[in-house]
Amino acid sequence: MRAHLLGLALLALPTFATAQPRPPEATPAPGAKAAAPPDAPPSGSTPRVRGPGPFRVPGDLPRPARVIAIELHGEVTRGMAAFVERVTGSLESGDLLLLDIKTFGGRVDAAVTIRDALLHTRDVGARTVAYVNPRAISAGALIAYATDVIVVAPGATMGAATPVQLGQDGEAKAVEDKVVSYMRQEMRATALARGRKGELAEAMVDSDVEVPGLIAKGKLLTLDGGAALEWGVASFEAASRDALLKKLGYGALGRTHQLRVVKALLAEDLAAWLSSAAVSSLLMTIGMLGLMIGLYSGGSPVPLVAGAGCLLLFFFGHYLTRLAGLEELLLFLLGVSLIAVEVFVAGTILPGVFGILCIVAALALGLLDFERVPLHVQWESGLIGSALAGVCGSLLAAVVLVAIALHLLPRSSLGKPLVLAEALEGRATAPAAAEAAARLVGQVGSAATDLRPAGKVMLAGRRHDARAQVGFVGAGSAIEVVQVRGLELVVRALPTAPAPIERSALPEDGAA
């Protein structure tokens, strides 16, 4: 943009300075290269060529019209996509949807969802206008290209739509060629669907695309407002929404309009917040932490309810944004059920392993959209890897927090009531809980499950979490409580008494 403005300024100088004395031209030193003329193209770029001019405003805009204005500001998220889908789904013939765009980009699947919704507005006889105010970068460029008319604000920019992924160091890195190819075709098809040049849209995604007179191969295309007008991407410039509508002809005789500004619903804002990366990770971590503590403490309701509530909020947010469905929720419930079988029935480790795998799979699937973005694109772009890393990271964080909780909770007034809750009648106080736990030392019972080394034991008709002091204790073996450690008992196997020998089986005195 600076080079373009500098060229215009230099072209205007001779007219402005005709009355001024002309300074003597500098003579280049021997062997030095002569300076390039003011209007010469930058080194390495293609020769300067003027574009075809502003994109023609379609002549079939509704008159009169009901103008529906919405704002697409900030990161392009699944919540934003759900909002746009709701608005476009309510459009009727004669409506004009005006999108005020200000974004640096966001999720690929969310942008594709918005793009599809905008392209289908013509099916109901509605028209769309994108107001780039002041930028539509990356995913924002795809959204703008999906509208019938693009209008730029002063100082607007649009382009740089190549997909990137975050590396392990947190820096953006280029994705595989398959992903670039997919996004390149998405941009091209969208531009052609609205009657614009496909190669300009491709050049915003792939640096290998050259547009003669505009950008050379090896550079990614980003247009300023002037270039967007000159090269047939935008139709005109407007400083405000009112100015935009006026330039479209609304307000003139026979072209009346009714303006209605639509905001996102509270549920959509909540869904967008719940489905954001940070909040989703937090909900997964707290949810799994609550389930682990609840199941480990023998079914204490407080952590179980808190954990289940957090995970239900996770699925609620992703359900509203159409990422999670009934299948993911059922898979998650299956995983919880298998873990419950492992905890309360035990005897084998397989239910617990499959339960954890089901929960991880359900949470990961709730972060992905295979309906609009192909599997290979999500894999190559790192979306699947990011989803699995997020879920596994939350699971690991929950395990670490459980270990810390096992060490700290028994010493705190909040955690003592959870210690060996099965041994307490009702809701005992913390001192009573500690006293009740201490009374279990020395009691004799039996192993309800194999202790390898952890499992369940029966004491006075109640089940308790327990751990073998040494080695393996088989189910049904007699045990004795030797210690209370955190939320579990430490037991030892009692020696098995020899079976009594019936007197009839003994040899009589004097018998050989």
Image (cartoon, rainbow, N blue to C red):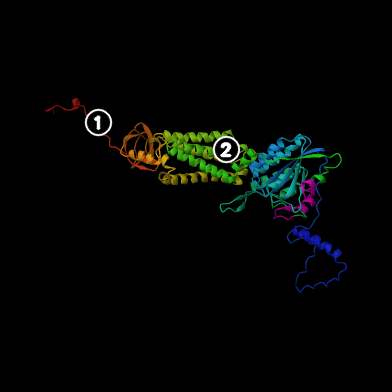
Is 323 on the left-hand or right-hand side of 354?
right
Q: Which residue is mark 2?
A: 315
Is 361 on the left-hand or right-hand side of 438?
right
Identified by mark 2, the residue type is: Phe
Q: Position of residue 112 (x, y in %)?
A: 67, 42
Q: Is residue 9 visible?
A: yes
Label 2, residues with CA under 10 Å away: few <14, some 14-19, many ≥20: many
Asked whether 419 or 231 is in front, the reply is 419
Quick one: quadrant of the N terminus? bottom right
Secondary-structure class at tag 2: helix
Q: Magenta segment range?
A: 215-243
Q: Is residue 478 visible?
A: no
Q: Compared to 505, does 101 lie above or below? A: below
Determine if the magenta segment contains residue 163: no
Residue at screen point 46% across, 46% down: 400
Q: Residue furthest top?
A: 504
Determine if the magenta segment contains residue 242: yes
Q: Position of residue 443 (x, y in %)?
A: 31, 36
Q: Position of residue 411 (x, y in %)?
A: 40, 45
Identified by mark 1, the residue type is: Ala
Q: Which residue is mark 1?
A: 499
Q: What is the C-alpha distance between the residues marked 1 and 2?
A: 57 Å
